[in-house]
Amino acid sequence: MDAHPGGASRVTEAAEHLVAELAANAATHGRLPGRDFRLALLDRRTTLRIEVTDTRGDDLPRHRPLAPDAESGRGLLLVEALADRWGVQPGPVPRNTVWAELDLPNP
């Protein structure tokens, strides 16, 4: 499997959390009635790219100030902590794609 102990399991766990968080964000904040979101996983040999495209398109995802006792709103902080890189790609209207990349361990 992986010549580097923990490398593959770290990527797998991070990918599971990233997919869950990005999909939950799209379903909660980026969904309009009659439209859905799209999830794509792209294996680029050295990088796993996770993309979630929502159907809202009118508000780009971004960090927002939170009260210390807020029960939600930390999703992008989690994405930032888990991903090696992440970002938001707007359009075409009415869509936004939030993506996160994980570097894959050498085989």
Image (cartoon, helix red, strand yellow):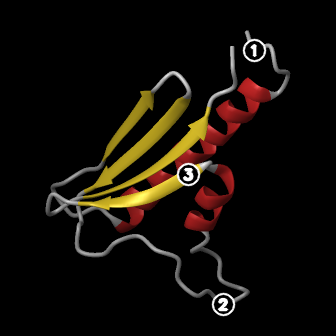
Callouts 2 and 1 close, C-beta under 8 Å: no
Counting every numbered tag in the picture gives 3
Circle 3: residue type: Arg
Find numbered disc 1 in the image and state the secondary structure of the residue it sits on. Answer: loop
Camera-side residue of 86 and 60: 86
Tell me which residue sits at (75%, 14%) in the image: 2
Q: For this rendering, which residue is in front, 80 or 28?
A: 80
Q: Residue at x 31, y 51 (%)?
A: 53
Which one is in front, 72 or 3?
3
Quarter of the image where the N terminus is located: top right
Q: Position of residue 44 (x, y in %)?
A: 46, 26
Q: Which residue is mark 3?
A: 85
Using the numbered discs, state the Cα–Cα distance from disc 1 to disc 3 in whole angstroms.
22 Å
State the image coordinates of residue 86 (x, y, percent, origin top left): 51, 54
Disc 1 designates what residue?
2
Q: Earlier in the sequence, mark 2 or mark 1?
A: 1
Residue 25 horizontal/vertical position (percent): 45, 60
CA gap, disc 2 and disc 1: 42 Å
On screen, residue 56 versus residue 47, left or right, reads left
Q: Which element type, helix, strand or loop, lies under badge 3?
A: strand
Say left or right for 53 vs 42: left
Q: Residue furthest right?
A: 5
Q: Which mark is residue 67?
A: 2
Residue type pointed to by label 2: Ala
In which image quadrant can residue 106 be found? Answer: top right
Please indicate whether residue 107 sits to the left or right of residue 98 in the image: right
Q: Quadrant of the C terminus?
A: top right
Going from N to C along the chain, the mark reached first, 1 or 3, is 1
Q: Which residue shows up at 57% across the image and 64% down it?
A: 75
- Judge whether 53 appears above or below 67 on screen: above
Amino acid carrying label 1: it is: Asp
Whether pointer 1 and pointer 3 mark residues with C-beta atoms closer than 8 Å, the reply is: no
